[in-house]
Image (tube, rainbow, N blue to C red):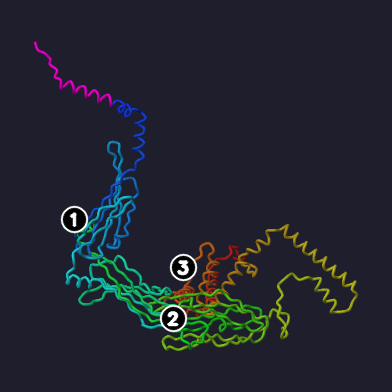
Amino acid sequence: MGWLIIQPSYTRKMKHSQMLLNKMRPIKRFLTSPLTGLLITLLILSSPASAKVAALLSNSSVGPDQPVRLTLQMEGEDEMNPDLGELETRFEILGRSTQQSISIINGKMSAKRSLILTLLPKQTGRIEIPPIRIGQESTQALVLEVAERTQQETEAESRQVLLELSLSKPKAYVEEEVLLTLRLFQAPGIRAESLTEPQPSMPDTQMRLLHEESYHSDRDGINYLVVERTYALFAYQSGTLEIGGVKYRGRSGKDRIFSFLNDPFNGSQPEIRHFRGESNRVELEVTPIPQGFAGDRWLPAKNLQVVESGLAQQTAIIAGKPVVRRIMILADGLTANQLPALEQTMPEGLKLYQERPQLKETPARTGISSSRQSGMTLIATEPGRYDLPEVEIPWWNIETDRQEVARLEAVSIEVLPNPGGASDPQPGQPQYTPEPSIPDESETIASGDQAAASGSRSETHWLVWLFAAAWVVTLFAWWYTRRNNPARPQQEAHAPDEKTADDPGKQAITEALARLESAYAERDAVSARAAWLHWAQLEWPENPPHNLTRLATRCDTAVSQAVLSLERAIYSPLDEPGWADFEVRSLIEQTAGEKRAEKPGDGLVPLNP
């Protein structure tokens, strides 16, 4: 029979544990109460979600002019807006891309974002990538080793890409055109990615691209691909102008995907190298306007002329009828905005109506050629002889470095009386051309009676009323006849063989031919083109041709030759002086007559077959 013996030490331990449990009961009741659980839940939800950021480099060391990828990772709900200001001082960012992934594990969602940057080091040696701040946190610092270039590699790289700037002259006047030429030399296998524009040091400088071409050139045993750009440079401020800052970036090698498509069994990765270059700087001394220039507007140009058209081609100028005169300023080395506006004072009795000027610029490799055409309509209120003042434009010849004057001699015009007037107007008496209106028979008869004899006023009064009543009866009879038989005038108006001057379609065609003939007489190619298209719209109203080429295909051989000759004169770089020698109205009327002769009869059966 066994006995259970309880040791005194064990009994003391049990008593101590019971005392601890009694003390922890209030804490247990507090932790297990519903109010405590709610407080803990609110505390967890109100605490901000922690964001984890990291930075990774694709390689810890690269060769010179080789890019490296930097990946910035962030885990959390915040937006990813890294501060790259300090990073851009040490690297050139060639490209960037983003990635995002969302995962849910055990009901917990987490979002990861990545920003991948392609960096090109701006220097060699040991480069430290500083901590990048993203939101409230920062990435760790990284170190990149960039291999140093050997002397041979430096010399070879300097020959791969060349940038050259040159000026047509080292010294020029204010607002004078100077040609700036940029040449980019690229060795075989190098492709350009970016090429910036030249940067002038003065703000009041205008540059315009005139010409760009590509060609091959051999230099020092290398067959370069040359890209040449020519700019027109205008400095509007005197002083020393510096131009430079043209930067180039290119690359050699192929991308991984293109290399795989070309050779999928080649396991070696292509080596991509980036090349950078910067042009030299050139200086231009800009001098102010010379004191010897006496013109109102400073015009430094290679050539400047003033020509006119319109008055010389007029065979006769009739009083009261408009005459168009066009004066054109032609200049080499100036923009169209630099050309001055013409201001003329007309003699008394001659009215002038200015049109909106037409500005045109033609860029070429040798510079800008511009023109300003001023159209004006002259109307003489009285017949006689009028002297139009001469036109003088002082300008500065930059080739001879002296002032010259472009002059348009004074013109004398003889204005003939208007044949539509009742009699020739007396000198000093303004000519008046009456407008067409319905004649008043009562006034005509009354004036005839007064001139024939001095009869009694009562008799004349009755005669006037008698003829007025007869005129009213005549109008009523005409209206009554037209009301009872409305179809007869319409049939007569549409008779196929009847020709009337009141047909609005024929009248519009007649006016269009007159405009076309006038444009050819004035040798105005632009107006001739507009007149041809207007005539074509009247001939083919449902489907009119919208250019001269389409119009020529619809006409016969003679008219087509005239149209194509005009088109070559407008758009061809070669001179076409004989375009205005065609008698276009005769050709059109002759063609229309031949078409009418070829038409069949009206379908009536002859009386004597």
Label 3, residues with CA under 10 Å away: few <14, some 14-19, many ≥20: few
- Per the image, label 3 sits on a secondary structure element best described as helix
> Disc 2 designates what residue?
174
Looking at the rendered structure, the kind of residue marked 2 is: Val
**Looking at the image, is 26 positioned above or below residue 378?**
above
**Looking at the image, is 375 positioned above or below residue 272?**
below
Relative placement, left or right, of 28 versus 313 is: left
User: For the magenta stretch, what is the residue range?
Assistant: 1-23
- Per the image, label 1 sits on a secondary structure element best described as loop
Q: Specify the quadrant that holds the C terminus.
A: bottom right
Label 1, residues with CA under 10 Å away: few <14, some 14-19, many ≥20: few
Look at the magenta stretch and give its main secondary structure. Answer: helix
Nearer-the-camera pick, 498 or 115: 115
Nearer-the-camera pick, 414 or 577: 414
Q: Position of residue 500 (x, y in %)?
A: 64, 69
The CA distance from mark 1 to mark 2 is 61 Å
> Disc 3 designates what residue?
550
Q: Where is residue 397 in the image (x, y as percent from the top left)?
A: 44, 86
Residue at the spot x=36%, y=40% of the render? 46
Nearer-the-camera pick, 605 or 559: 559
Residue at the spot x=22%, y=58% of the render? 143
> Disc 1 designates what residue?
264
**Looking at the image, is 429 positioned above or below residue 505?**
below
**Looking at the image, is 609 positioned above or below residue 7?**
below
Residue 426 makes an appearance in the image: yes
Looking at the rendered structure, the kind of residue marked 1 is: Pro
